[in-house]
Amino acid sequence: MAIQAPKGTKDMLPQNAYKWYYIEDKLRHIAATYACREIRTPAFESTELFERGVGDTTDVVQKEMYTFEDKGGRSVTLKPEGTSPAVRAFVENSLFNEAQPTKLYYFTPVFRYENVQKGRLREHHQFGIEIFGSKEASLDAEIISLAMRAFREFGIRGLKLNINNIGCPKCRKTYNDALKAYLKENYDDLCDVCKSRFEKNPMRILDCKNKDCKKIVEGAPVILDYVCDDCREHFDKLQSYLTALGIEFKIDPLIVRGLDYYTKTVFEIINKDITVCGGGRYDGLIQEIGGPEMPAVGFGMGLERLILTLEEEGIEIPKSNYIDLYIASMDEASKIEALKIVNSLREKGIKCDCNHMSRNVKGQMKYSNKIEAAYTIVLGESELNEKRAKLKRMNDGEQIDIDITDLEDIVLKIK
């Protein structure tokens, strides 16, 4: 029996690579227009990073992490999210000493052991934005603007933006006391996981997917009624900035996000009841991981889910030529010449190939059609003797007479 890919993983096949190139190129360009620079972090980190940053009462840490001991007896974890590693790199490399804010973006694989569903894999890929060093609500609005612009440029319409403010450590304590008082009456009906969260982190109960727990929290106190003046002012400013940018939004007091490091702003972008992007502010995470007291804000966007959304919306991703030119050959002498020409053209940036399968000319032309070559040339004895051949444009069959020794002219005609 052939070995198969692990459950919840998916190969990116060559015929689909153009979709990823297109999406990544566009997102890189958009991030650059917002003055963001790329960062890359390892696929695995110390387990402590996620226990301290994400929170040991979250679903991610309790249920979903791929954690193991390496040969040195160290506990390491395949990263389940991109923010904590970016913060770790920011602190470890003392980027806090540079001019602030620090604006970063990344593409990264993330790993979570969860039920495999449509658009949800155990290994998936994220595009993320992380901005360190500023407490201003204008940056919260800016990253939301960046995300909304990305979806708009991909052609996705009808998105809904939901926002909330989940307070800071000062007002969170007051809210947790009120929430515990409410939940205490229904404690026996909570799931075992939520019972374990009751004392240490009752707010995580709001994020539980258990249907009984979800029903219990429907009447829970709303955190917006408990936020302090500073958090309230920040939330009011965020709304004014979003309005100034022409971004419509709805306040959803039930958004808490699934990671403990969030403070103040949290948001989700929804497409047909599916969250396609989420993020918020995490002003205590840098200090928690060992850096200075410094605010931060960011978001994550799943790339597989983005591709799925584009497909479901019927939005076609532009497909670039896999190959510009295929040179067919009739005999060994012309095969050698074809090999020389394609090798020289590749150095000039032309994507080209020739016969490596001992096919006859008819078979080579069928192959050039299958690989969707934009142009073809057929070389034989007469073409070699005369140093001339026909450059055939495959989409309409037009043929152009060329000098096979004039490579610059061939490049001009193909481009």
Image (cartoon, rainbow, N blue to C red):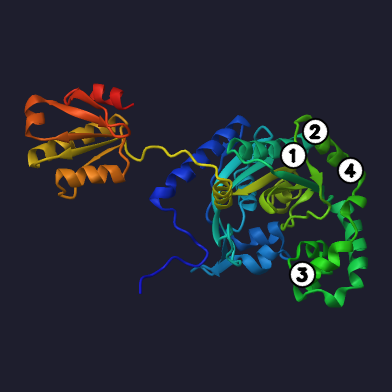
Q: Residue at x 75, y 70 (%)?
A: 210
Q: CA distance from mark 1 to mark 3?
A: 32 Å
Residue type marked 1:
Asp
Q: Residue at x 57, y 50 (%)?
A: 312
Q: CA distance from mark 3 to mark 4?
A: 31 Å
Front residue (pair 156, 4): 156
Q: In the image, 19: left or right of 132?
A: left
Residue type marked 3:
Lys
Q: Quadrant for residue 47, please give it.
A: bottom right
* Mark 2, residue position: 243
Q: Nearer the viewer, mark 1 or mark 3?
A: 3
Residue 187, relative to residue 224: is it above or below? below
Mark 3 packing: few (<14 Cα in 10 Å), some, or many (20+)? few
Q: In the image, 320: left or right of 329?
A: right
Q: Nearer the viewer, mark 3 or mark 4?
A: 3
* Mark 1, residue position: 140
* Mark 4, residue position: 232
Q: Quadrant of the C terminus?
A: top left
Q: Residue at x 69, y 58 (%)?
A: 54
**Residue 26 coordinates in the image, percent (x, y):** 54, 36
First in residue order: circle 2 vs circle 4: 4
For the residues bearing labels 3 and 4, Cβ distance under 8 angstroms: no
First in residue order: circle 1 vs circle 4: 1
First in residue order: circle 2 vs circle 1: 1
Residue 404, relative to residue 39: is it above or below? above
Front residue (pair 25, 366): 366
Q: In the image, 291: left or right of 116?
A: right
Q: Quadrant of the N terminus?
A: bottom left
Asked whether the viewer can see residue 64, the reply is yes
Q: Quadrant for residue 342, please give it.
A: top left
First in residue order: circle 1 vs circle 3: 1
